[in-house]
Amino acid sequence: MSYFDIILKKRSCQVLFWRDFNAVFLFGVLRLPEGAGDRQKSPKASPADNIFAVVKKQILWYNQSYNIMQRKKDMKTLYLSDLDGTLLSAESKLTPRTLDTLNRLIGGGMNFSVATARTAFSTGFVLSGLRLTLPTIQQNGVYLYDFAEQEMLGTQYIPTQSVTRVFDLLSGSDISPLVYTARDNVQTTHFERVTSPNMQAFLDMRATQYGQVIPRVARLESLADCGIVYFCFIDTKERLAALAGAVREISGISSVYSRDVSLVGEVWLLELFSESASKAGGAKYLREHGGFERVVGFGDSLNDLPLFAECDVSIAVANAADEVKSAADIVIGANTEDSVARWLEENV
């Protein structure tokens, strides 16, 4: 907090400002010497008149800026963050600082949730200790999950004909996916065979870090009638490239082909889900059902671009993909610097 006393000597004018963070208020009044109003105006503005005009213009700008900021603060706002590469650290964890900051802000009334490609199971694992009160967006918008009620909401299933075409495409292929199904408010994951070291590393990580042993099935086609919501292929960029191009020709599904920042090394994912599902759809659902007037979103990867499209303010972390930073309204520090928590602490 600082004070500025601007003295315009030639007109004996004094303007007093008080600055508090981003808001600037006009506290004082212009004081003219006695009889100054009786003087005849010069046809040409004096230097003091020019200075006065500039000061007046800045006063109006400061007041307008403050009013805009106040209106935004008064709006019911939802804050949505991606997890891996954005809110989580390089170790795919919430740092103590981020956890403490979020819990304090949520406790103070901040409306906060997450939008992730993870399942509810792994989201619950990495966000242990975070006191979320709103439903979360899972698997790129395939469903929302309310941790308080332990309930799946708005599940988007892959159409049967699209599932059949994916299985036809995989016939005779040396690449096999993880298949996610949802039924009776429970999501399950299965695989048929391990087709890459990256896939094996993922299965091992789930078993050792999360205590989740993913079951094997004899044939993935046996899951066709179990409510398939997601296919996830885990391999190298080169081995997945042709398949990524082929699945774009299948109607009824959307795909995300990107590097997985949560795993060590050059691990690439090809994720398939209903074309009706997206992080944008999840954000829209929360906006409408929560009565939010404004949505602020944080992200780093290509699957966050649909989220940004639904947000009133989009914020990318410094480590985000170039396309994501170009699409963002604001770019903050990296995920390794607690940047999302820092921004929320300073702006909410």
Image (cartoon, rainbow, N blue to C red):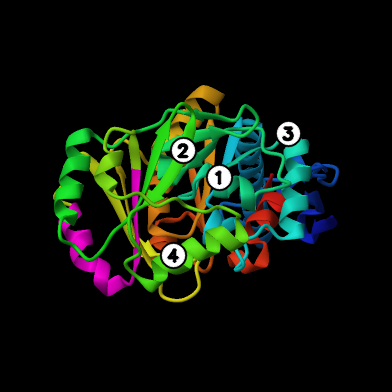
Q: Of discs 1 and 3, which sits in the foreground?
A: 1
Looking at the rendered image, the disc whose residue lies closer to the viewer, 4 or 2, is 2
Give the percent coordinates (x, y) of residue 159: 24, 34
- Front residue (pair 222, 340): 222
Residue 284 sits above or below residue 124 on the image = above
x and y percent of residue 235 in the render? 34, 68
Name the quarter where the C terminus is drawn: top right
> Foreground: 225 or 246?
225
x and y percentages locating residue 175 in the rendered image: 26, 63
Amino acid type of the residue that numbered disc 1 sits on in the rendered structure: Phe
Q: Give the range drawn in magenta.
A: 230-247
Q: Mark 2 points at which residue?
A: 187
Residue designated by label 3: 109
Q: Is mark 1 on a helix, strand or loop?
A: helix
Q: Mark 4 points at which residue?
A: 260
Label 1: few (<14), some or many (≥20) within 10 Å? some
Q: Which amino acid does label 2 sit on?
A: Gln
Image-quadrant location for residue 268: bottom left
